[in-house]
Image: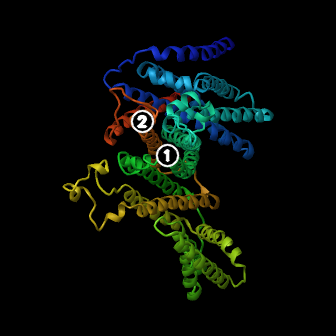
């Protein structure tokens, strides 16, 4: 083992230097049937999918192991061990696809690969290989010492897991540098007349190239995405094993495991859109022409499909929660929901409605007017269409009035005389507390009713998000002749505007949050009958995993297509005959094929790691 490790390190140190010097003298080869671009696309996407799991899974594996130590619940330790076993198997696939991907780059695009290696040699030639080897050693050391480091030595095993995650995150950040550089290469300082390519090749340092516009947003976006991905794959493992289980004890455990995987996946998914918006904003700041190309022209339908897939993932998660509630026994309150409780819910949704429901019409109307004035003043200040002088004057006039009315109505409602500033600061917390109190007092039937309504709202929100202004791939394809046939009717064109779509997205996220609050509070109040979940819920877990795989492939196409006809945007053009921007239909076919391949490999790894031994054990017992 030591000799093999030393040889691997020697190859990692020597081979890249030789490779960087000889790549550029190679002539590009031609990949048969699919072409060079699709071949590199497929290998890169498969490598990223495997890498996303082996980087994301150890994060919640260590958290699960720590929870097992803290709660003395052996289920957490078993979950962590089973997921680690599958991760160890899939890690070899990560290395294999990465090696084939590098080989394809060298042979199919030698000029570009040599240029990129020369500029990121310390990262791609030395740092990344050494980090990959170190992560491999720590991963297998973490796995093979599992049984030995128990009891009083469990803390040492947790420390190895933490070290594994640190190395994985550093590896992710390191390789994201060259990847993000391809989309947003470092710009020359203002006032410098040097050509961008000359600046990069002669003046820019390695840190300048790494610390480009989209590097850090890409790091956080991929980190949250990897955790989401790992959670959904854990749910896939649980769904398979639940279907294979023959005893109530096994079904109870894998039912619990599916709940944990789904919870982790959706929890990380809720912050993923925010990371995505920050990531997209960096492209706008870097080059204003990328924004319309991304959102309103060539790639607009890709983003509509992305929103649709995220909506479907939300739908599947809401359905899983709906089915999960049926296996929880919750003691219902003997009395109906009180008037105060309804007022609390109404106040949490729209401030002022609760006061009006209690008969305090003056306070309720004053509260609504005050909040409207406050929001209106903020809107005019930040609106691009308002003049600066008008917005400032409205702010100066309406803001004190809004503070006075809101605070006075709040004091009238509570019967106290709080200061205006304190009332406004306490208000969101108070309303949130009222909403949580209302949800806490809901019985099982009311919880199911709310989640059913949330499911319907998710359906409508998803349909609104996927409704385009015109059913064409690009705005340039819309002409006077076909506009009447391809555009929405004038009465429904508001569905294509951003206010409607942002409202739909906001409602979708809100419904998922409410569903999770109801679900988690029901778990605390009721008794869970693990293993008694509806069998159809396992198909929701399988779809969540496949939907996450497919969506990751779609986002990879979007990120790569933003470079247009460049290898390195605005620096190194792609003049090969395989250069093209794929359509959504073509991309969907390729993404689906790759998703099926990855899904099949992961399913095989699950069967090898857990299913085969499970079947053999059952056969021996019989």
Quarter of the view holding residue 422: bottom right
Could you tell me how many numbered marks the image carries?
2
User: Residue reaching furthest right?
Assistant: 152
Q: In which quarter of the image is the N terminus?
A: top right
List x then y, in percent, for residue 506.
49, 61
Location of residue 37 with respect to 309 vertically, above or below = above
List x then y, in percent, for residue 344.
59, 75
Q: Which mark is drawn over residue 283?
A: 1
Who is closer to the viewer here, 38 or 4?
38
Q: Which residue is at 44% across, 59% downward?
A: 458
List x then y, in percent, for residue 4.
64, 13
Q: Looking at the image, is mark 1 or mark 2 earlier in the sequence?
A: 1
Quarter of the view holding residue 31: top left
Per the model, the C-alpha gap separating discs 1 and 2 is 27 Å
Residue identified by numbered label 2? 595
Location of residue 571 with respect to 114 vertically, above or below = below
Q: Which mark is drawn over residue 353?
A: none
Quarter of the view holding residue 149: top right
Of tags 1 and 2, the one toward the viewer is 1
Who is closer to the viewer here, 456 or 173?
173
Residue 606 visible here: no
Q: In this view, does 139 lie to the left or right of 582?
A: right
Q: Is residue 79 left or right of residue 452?
A: right
Residue 39 visible here: yes
- Graded by Cα atoms within 10 Å as few (under 14), some (14 to 19) or many (20 or more), the crowding at tag 1 reads some
Q: What element carries label 2?
A: helix
Location of residue 415 with respect to 500 vertically, above or below = below
């Amino acid at each position: 083992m030591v000799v093999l490790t030393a040889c691997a390190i020697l190859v990692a140190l020597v081979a890249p230097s030789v490779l960087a010097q000889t790549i550029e003298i190679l002539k590009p080869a031609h990949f048969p049937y699919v072409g060079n671009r699709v071949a590199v696309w497929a290998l890169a996407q498969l490598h990223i999918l495997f890498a996303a799991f082996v980087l994301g899974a150890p994060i919640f594996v260590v958290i699960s192991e720590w929870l097992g130590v803290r709660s003395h619940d052996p289920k957490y330790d078993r979950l962590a061990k089973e997921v680690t076993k599958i991760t160890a198997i899939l890690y070899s696939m990560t290395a294999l696809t990465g090696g084939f991907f590098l080989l394809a780059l060298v042979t199919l695009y030698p000029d570009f690969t040599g240029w990129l290696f020369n500029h990121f040699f310390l990262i791609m030639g030395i740092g990344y290989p050494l980090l990959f080897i170190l992560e491999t050693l720590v991963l297998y050391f973490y796995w093979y010492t599992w049984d030995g480091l128990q009891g009083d030595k469990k803390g040492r095993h947790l420390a190895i897991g933490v070290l594994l995650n640190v190395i994985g995150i550093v590896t992710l950040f390191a390789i994201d540098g060259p990847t993000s550089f391809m989309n947003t290469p470092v710009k020359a300082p203002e006032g410098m007349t040097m050509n961008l390519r000359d600046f990069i090749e002669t003046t820019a340092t390695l840190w300048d190239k790494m610390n480009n516009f989209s590097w850090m947003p890409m790091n956080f976006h991929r980190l949250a995405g990897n955790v989401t991905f790992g959670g959904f794959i854990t749910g896939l493992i649980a769904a398979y094993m639940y279907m294979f289980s023959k005893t109530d004890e096994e079904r109870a455990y894998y039912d619990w495991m599916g709940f944990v995987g789904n919870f982790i996946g959706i929890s990380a998914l809720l912050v993923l859109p925010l990371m995505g918006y920050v990531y997209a904003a960096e492209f706008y700041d870097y080059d204003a022409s990328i924004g319309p190309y991304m959102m309103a022209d060539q790639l607009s339908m890709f983003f509509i499909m992305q929103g649709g897939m995220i909506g479907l993932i939300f739908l599947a998660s809401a359905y899983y929660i709906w089915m999960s509630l049926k296996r929880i026994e919750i003691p219902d309150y003997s009395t109906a929901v009180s008037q105060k409780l309804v007022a609390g819910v109404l106040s949490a949704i729209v401030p002022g409605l609760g006061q009006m429901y209690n008969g305090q019409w003056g306070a309720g109307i004053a509260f609504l007017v005050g909040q409207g004035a406050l929001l209106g003043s903020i809107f005019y200040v930040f609106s691009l269409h308002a003049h600066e002088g008008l917005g400032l004057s409205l702010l100066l006039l309406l803001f004190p009035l809004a503070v006075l009315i809101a605070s006075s109505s709040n004091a009238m409602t509570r019967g106290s005389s709080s200061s205006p500033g304190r009332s406004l600061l306490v208000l969101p917390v108070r309303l949130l507390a009222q909403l949580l109190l209302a949800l806490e007092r809901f019985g099982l039937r009311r919880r199911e009713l709310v989640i059913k309504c949330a499911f319907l709202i998710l359906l409508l929100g998803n349909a609104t998000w996927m409704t385009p202004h015109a059913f064409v791939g690009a705005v340039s394809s819309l002409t006077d002749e076909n506009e009447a046939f391809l555009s929405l009717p004038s009465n429904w064109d508001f569905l294509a505007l951003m206010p409607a779509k942002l409202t739909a997205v906001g409602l979708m996220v809100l419904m998922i949050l409410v569903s999770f609050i109801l679900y988690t509070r029901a778990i605390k109040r009721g008794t869970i009958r693990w293993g008694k979940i509806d069998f159809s819920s396992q198909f929701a877990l399988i779809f969540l995993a496949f939907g996450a795989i497919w969506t990751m492939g779609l986002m990879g196409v979007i990120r790569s297509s933003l470079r247009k006809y460049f290898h390195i945007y605005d620096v190194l053009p792609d003049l090969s005959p395989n250069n093209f921007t794929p359509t959504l239909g073509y991309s969907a076919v390729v993404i689906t094929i790759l998703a099926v391949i990855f899904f099949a490999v992961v399913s095989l790894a699950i069967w090898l790691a857990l299913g085969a031994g499970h079947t053999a054990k059952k056969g021996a017992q019989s």
